[in-house]
Amino acid sequence: MNALIDPKKFQDPEVTAKGEKRAQVFFKTLETLWFNTGSQCNIECANCYIASSPTADHFIYLTQEDMAPYLDEIDAMQQGPIEIAFTGGEPYLNPNIIRLSEMALERGHSLLVLTNAMKPMMRPRVQAGLLDLRRRFPGKMTLRVSLDHFTQEGHDTERGQGSFEIAVTGVNWLTENNFLTHIAGRAMFSENEADARAGYSALIQAHGWRVTASNPAQLLLFPEMDERIDVPEITVACWSILDIHPDTMMCATSRMIVRRKGEPRAVVLACTLLWDDPQFQTGETLKEALGPVALNHPHCAKFCVLGGASCSA
């Protein structure tokens, strides 16, 4: 049976349950600005990082008016182009997604879109928009497709029967049309990384996808995020013990924009994963949102520090 996290843990942003000084991450520079385009998804995964589903509406669809002020703020920082990234839900359900993509690319930024490559992406209107963007902004847009496992059985266990075949069809279309494509999988508990990469490599070669399985930027393997499993709290001392620098954490170089249902405007979160914890809502503007982030959540330990994972490219 899985252990339950000690209820005394992750309560105080300053100190751990043992009274040790909790680690925090100071903002360094903005490398990736995430936009959650909406929490609605065409499927409901068994273990979704952000509780998306066909009926999820905790984040409403972002509009051009929501996005533009943050692009203006990036310009005001005078640090040049960055990575703009879209996540969801499924971004290609958002009726504004092609224009939102165009807005990022017109400003000179690179664009990363996280998608399940299923029917929302394959609608003729979306396909036409994607082909136009690829033609006008060559090499500036990457689609990262979620394939939770390299087998149909493993993937469908997470995402529903038949989802693997539909996603493979989507990746085939992206490959045939020369899109930059990456894959995001999940590191299943029953296999090591070498076995997982070998399994994905066989799948990739069988379909002729232009993805290098040995390249961690092209095939990302994310740790499982089972909140029932106990994890240690990260203290200041952990940085030297683990030989990890806090600047390598996502929250040193990224933020996420969301628009909550019923709220008058978009807000900034410290992390793509910590969407339902008020302590990680850091402001309405980027200027307000660039303060230090206390690692006061199990995901901080499991995904970022101990898992060594990052949602950014």
Image: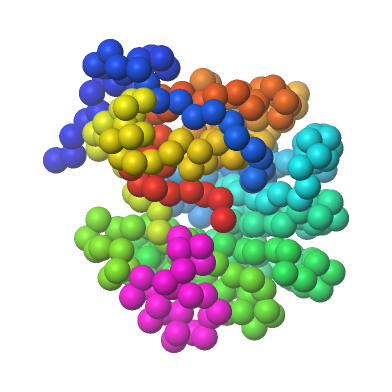
Classify residue 162 by image quadrant. Answer: bottom left
Q: Is residue 207 visible?
A: yes
Whether residue 202 is in magenta: the answer is yes
Q: Is residue 167 left or right of residue 67?
A: left
Going 36% across and 34% down the picture, which residue do you hit? Answer: 239
- Magenta range is 197-220
Q: Position of residue 10 (x, y in %)?
A: 35, 22
Q: Position of residue 1 (x, y in %)?
A: 14, 40
Q: Is residue 95 visible?
A: no
Q: Is residue 93 left or right of residue 215?
A: right
Q: Position of residue 241 (x, y in %)?
A: 28, 35
User: In the figure, 24 relative to 226: above or below?
Assistant: above
Whether residue 164 is in magenta: the answer is no
Going 36% across and 25% down the picture, which residue do you hit? Answer: 236
Classify residue 59 by image quadrant. Answer: top right
Q: Position of residue 178 (x, y in %)?
A: 68, 79
Going 51% across and 62% down the picture, which residue do you hit? Answer: 217
Identify the colour scheme used: rainbow
User: In the figure, 49 relative to 283: above or below?
Assistant: below
User: In the figure, 45 relative to 301: above or below?
Assistant: below
Q: Nearer the viewer, residue 140 or 77?
A: 77
Q: Nearer the viewer, residue 284 or 240?
A: 240
Q: Residue furthest left?
A: 1
Going 64% across and 38% down the picture, which residue do you hit? Answer: 29
- Quadrant where the C terminus lies? bottom right
